[in-house]
């Protein structure tokens, strides 16, 4: 090997070991699949990272679609409910939901940035401390992550900038629209448009639950997104501030081009996360209301995800346990 090639290999190894140290949590868990894919892809190309992982250790867990419980579609509004089993919920919590809750992609990006600045062991320990902090999320936040994972996996959505990154206080709640991103349209030119989503989590034994109604209810939030150009303009600017220089900038350009030509050219999603008996009354009334006066270019979907009975109160605990178990399992795979 040439001296130049040897030096490159040493640098790859040095950075790989440092990155591994930075993304290893304080309790000794090993890096996740996405961390390793990112690391391999950074130096050898994305296809190398994916192929190497999937050949040796298998693919990531997908978010289950659940079993359809009812269909109460209205003109221009899709409204459907789906039931999750305990196995479905565990699969989702161990995979994509975990990565969303703890923003693994964002921490991996920060790890690469901070690794270049950590020139001493003390500094490296500081980076590890900052990146390994993992507060237990509230149950409603787990419900929101479940909804996001469902839309990404099954509705062609992508939400590249989690609202949690805008929090200056980790104990605060994000304000504004819950989910802001893109929806694949399947068209060749400008194939993405904006996707705006609102999520409510409720175990109330009422159909529909109170979170659907009122000034801050799911129905009113979707009506504002449907009718208010001012609300959507703010989201256009919000996402634009974060898009410059990111890999998803072309998606933003596509969606913004469509939106500026027609502000009604958006996809709206309302997701209700429940742990009660599935009943179409959860969505049927609101589907009809949202269909009235809906612009032809606006697509609206209402989705209700029914978790196992009385499971919402334990979502945070189950998510934390699933993450710990999955990371330990991935660590075993890496060591082998």
Image (spheres, rainbow, N blue to C red):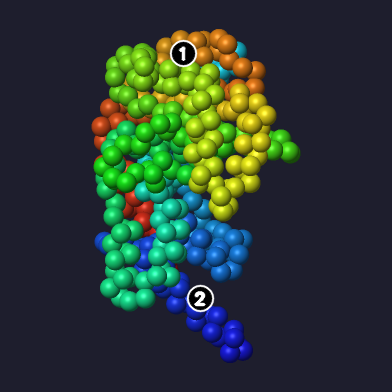
Classed neighbour count for the residue bearing mark 1: other residues with Cα under 10 Å, few (<14), some (14–19), many (≥20): many
**Residue 286: image tag:** 1
Q: Quadrant of the N terminus?
A: bottom right
Q: Is residue 135 left or right of residue 63?
A: left
Locate residue 29: give its quadrant.
bottom left
Q: Quadrant of the C terminus?
A: bottom left
Question: Residue drawn 45% across and 71% down?
Answer: 16
Q: Which residue matches tag 2? A: 12
Residue 301: x %, y % from top left:
53, 23
> Which residue is at a point 36% across and 66% down the rendered structure image?
22
In the image, 45 versus 241, the foreground residue is: 241
Q: How many numbered circles are shown?
A: 2
Spatial CA distance of label 2 from label 1 is 55 Å
The reply to whether residue 180 is visible in this rendering is yes
User: At numbered mark 1, what does the secondary structure look like: helix, strand or loop?
Assistant: helix
Q: Nearer the viewer, residue 141 or 292?
A: 292
Q: Is residue 205 left or right of residue 299?
A: left
């Amino acid at each position: 090997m040439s001296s130049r090639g040897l030096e490159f290999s040493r640098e790859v190894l040095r950075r790989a070991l440092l990155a591994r140290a930075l993304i290893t949590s304080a309790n000794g868990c090993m890096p996740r699949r996405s961390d390793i894919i990112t690391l391999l892809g950074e130096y050898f190309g994305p296809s190398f990272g994916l192929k190497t992982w999937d050949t040796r250790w298998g693919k990531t867990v997908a978010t289950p679609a659940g079993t359809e419980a009812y269909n109460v579609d209205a003109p221009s509004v899709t409204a459907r409910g789906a039931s999750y089993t305990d196995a479905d919920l565990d699969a989702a919590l161990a995979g994509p939901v975990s990565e969303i809750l703890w923003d693994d992609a964002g921490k991996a990006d920060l790890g690469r940035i901070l690794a270049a600045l950590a020139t001493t062991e003390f500094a490296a320990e500081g980076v590890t401390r900052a990146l390994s902090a993992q507060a237990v999320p509230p149950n409603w936040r787990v419900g929101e992550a479940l909804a996001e994972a469902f839309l990404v996996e099954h509705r062609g959505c992508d939400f590249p900038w989690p609202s949690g990154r805008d929090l200056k206080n980790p104990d605060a709640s994000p304000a504004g629209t819950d989910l802001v991103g893109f929806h694949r349209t399947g068209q060749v030119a400008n194939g993405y448009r904006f996707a705006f989503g609102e999520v409510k989590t409720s175990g109330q034994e009422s159909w529909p639950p109170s979170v659907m109604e009122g000034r801050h209810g799911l129905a009113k939030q979707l009506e504002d997104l449907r009718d208010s150009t001012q609300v959507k303009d703010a989201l256009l600017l919000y996402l634009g501030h974060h898009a410059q220089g990111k890999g998803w900038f072309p998606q933003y350009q596509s969606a913004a081009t469509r939106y500026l030509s027609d502000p009604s050219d958006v996809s709206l999603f309302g997701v209700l996360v429940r742990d009660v008996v599935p009943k179409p009354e959860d969505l049927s009334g609101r589907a009809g209301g949202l269909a009235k006066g809906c612009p032809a270019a606006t697509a609206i979907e209402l989705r209700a995800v029914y978790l196992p009975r009385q499971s919402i109160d334990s979502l945070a605990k189950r998510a934390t346990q699933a993450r710990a178990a999955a990371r330990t399992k991935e660590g075993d795979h890496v060591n082998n």
